Amino acid sequence: MNQLGMFADKPTLENGRARLRPFTPADIEAMGPILADPEVLRLTGSVHTSEEANASPPRLDPATRQWYETRADQSDRLDLAIVDPATDSCVGEAVLNDLDAANGSCNFRILIGDAGRDRGIGSAAIRLLRDHAFGTTGLNRIELEVYAFNPRARHVYERCGFIFEGLRRSAHKFDGEYIDAIMMSMLRSDWESAKSPD
Ligand SMILES: CC(C)(COP(=O)(O)OP(=O)(O)OC[C@H]1O[C@@H](n2cnc3c(N)ncnc32)[C@H](O)[C@@H]1OP(=O)(O)O)[C@@H](O)C(=O)NCCC(=O)NCCS
């Protein structure tokens, strides 16, 4: 397998609770308010103060819009819209990025806006992307970071099979407080031995 082209295939993945697909123009439009959601901004470490979290405009700037328009052309990363199958509307995104082809490793990240959270969509999306990655590519390791002030995300990652690896202590500062970053990963062997670790 050409490791660098590992993510050239841009699939649509679906289970009962979530659909993942390459961004459509409507999905890109929907990302404006999602990326401006104060909780998304805070929990992803995109801002350092509540003031910043509450001040982001709900429209994509031209550079960010172009970013989404070009995701389907990237063979070294996989960016998919998370869609609520009940409404066919985009509620967030799930991403495999920072591919280290020589080591068969990449990073995972996910964000869901206010309308999509706490309805099982995030857990379903993670399972879909996890199974696609280990089931159809040669990937051996998926890693991620979650801030200690985000117990919901940690709970969901653990439920989907990610394992605690360690801490980057006080890696992030928010509203004057230092926050640990929790490192987690899942190996192909974890996935194979559990197959359905949910
Ligand atoms: C993290 C995220 C992807 C989870 O997706 P989701 O669709 O909201 O999560 P689900 O509905 O699948 O599951 C939520 C689970 O967390 C639990 N939960 C909710 N709040 C919690 C809290 N404060 N502490 C612990 N668990 C919590 C729920 O009870 C549920 O677990 P259960 O099914 O065992 O009861 C989503 O909430 C999100 O994108 N949040 C904002 C951005 C973010 O945090 N991104 C991740 C950065 S590392």
Image (spheres, grey):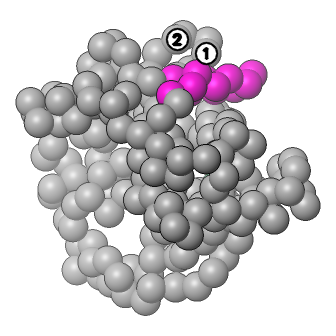
Residue 56 placement (x, y as % from top left): 15, 43
Q: Hey, what amino acid is under mark 2?
A: Asp
- The residues colored magenta run 10-21
Judge whether 168 appears above or below 4 on screen.
below
Name the side, left or right, on which 16 lies relative to 102: right
Q: Residue at x 45, y 24 (%)?
A: 22
User: Can residue 33 be seen at all in this image of the molecule?
Assistant: no
Q: Hey, what amino acid is under mark 1?
A: Pro
Which residue reaches farthest front?
Answer: 1
Q: Assess disc 2: are there few (<14), some (14-19) or many (≥20) residues with their C-alpha within 10 Å of its C-alpha.
A: few
- Label 2, on which residue? 88
| Residue 120 occupies quadrant | top right
Closest to the observer, 163 or 136: 136
Q: Residue at x 54, y 75 (%)?
A: 183
| Residue 176 occupies quadrant | bottom left
Name the side, left or right, on which 73 lies relative to 183: left
